[in-house]
Amino acid sequence: MLANLLKHQLGLKLLVLLGLIAVSPVRAETCHPLNVIGGDGVKVRKTVSPISTLVTNNNWNTDFAVSGGVIFNRYVATVIPENNANYDLKLILKFSDNTTSEFYNKSNVAVKVNKPVTMVGEPRSQTEPYQINVFVGGINAIGNTYTVSVIGCR
């Protein structure tokens, strides 16, 4: 008898809890595109250049500006490849004290045509980055084309 009473009470508590969860308001996340530094707009299309030499630089890094006064709780970089290829990928948040936080660092990632690859990074507590760096390159990626963009979400 006691066991049945406990099961009944537990069942009622679970039902009430599920009901509260079901009617709780869901806050929608608001995301804003970040501007490409040294370019126009919020996305850039690149073809991976050969590796750097003593006289040439590669184009494997793209920086995006974080607007001052806006606090985001995460940053999402999206790479959309135009070719099946293997890329080295990194997502790095840059801070005004000349430090960085690396959130994604994978080598030789197999990507497929028009299949987005996303990388997510979160700022440090009480510190907002001023730039988001997206690294897309690698020896196996040379000659392949992609589009990259970053959004900040809060």
Image (cartoon, helix red, strand yellow):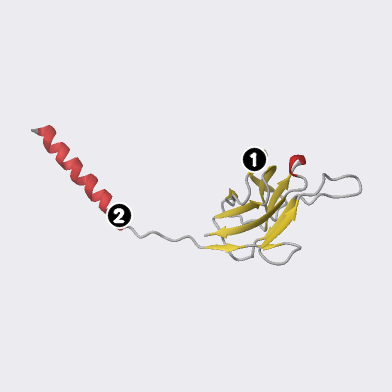
- Corner quadrant of residue 26: bottom left
Element type where label 2 sits in the image: helix
Q: Residue at x 78, y 52 (%)?
A: 59
For label 1, count other residues whose C-alpha is less than 10 Å away and answer few (under 14), some (14-19) or many (20+).
Answer: few
Q: Residue furthest left?
A: 1
Give residue 87's position: percent from left, percent from top.
Answer: 69, 43
Name above or below for residue 10 compared with residue 72.
above
Element type where label 1 sits in the image: strand
**Does label 2 or label 1 sit earlier along the sequence?**
2
Give residue 101's position: percent from left, percent from top.
Answer: 65, 46
Quarter of the image with the N terminus is top left
Q: Residue at x 28, y 54 (%)?
A: 20
For label 2, count other residues whose C-alpha is less than 10 Å away and answer few (under 14), some (14-19) or many (20+).
Answer: few
Q: Which mark is residue 110?
A: 1
- Corner quadrant of residue 53: top right
Name above or below for residue 37 compared with residue 144.
below
Give residue 51's position: percent from left, percent from top.
Answer: 82, 44
Q: Residue at x 26, y 53 (%)?
A: 19
- Corner quadrant of residue 103: top right
- Give the Cα separation between the discs numbered 2 and 1: 39 Å
- Between tags 2 and 1, which lies in front? 1
Q: Is 120 left, or right, of 135 in this rendering?
A: left
Give residue 27's position: percent from left, percent from top.
Answer: 42, 60
Q: Which mark is residue 22?
A: 2
Q: Amino acid at mark 1?
A: Ala
Name above or below for residue 55 compared with residue 71.
above
Q: Is 143 left, or right, of 94 in this rendering?
A: right
Q: Amino acid at mark 2?
A: Ala
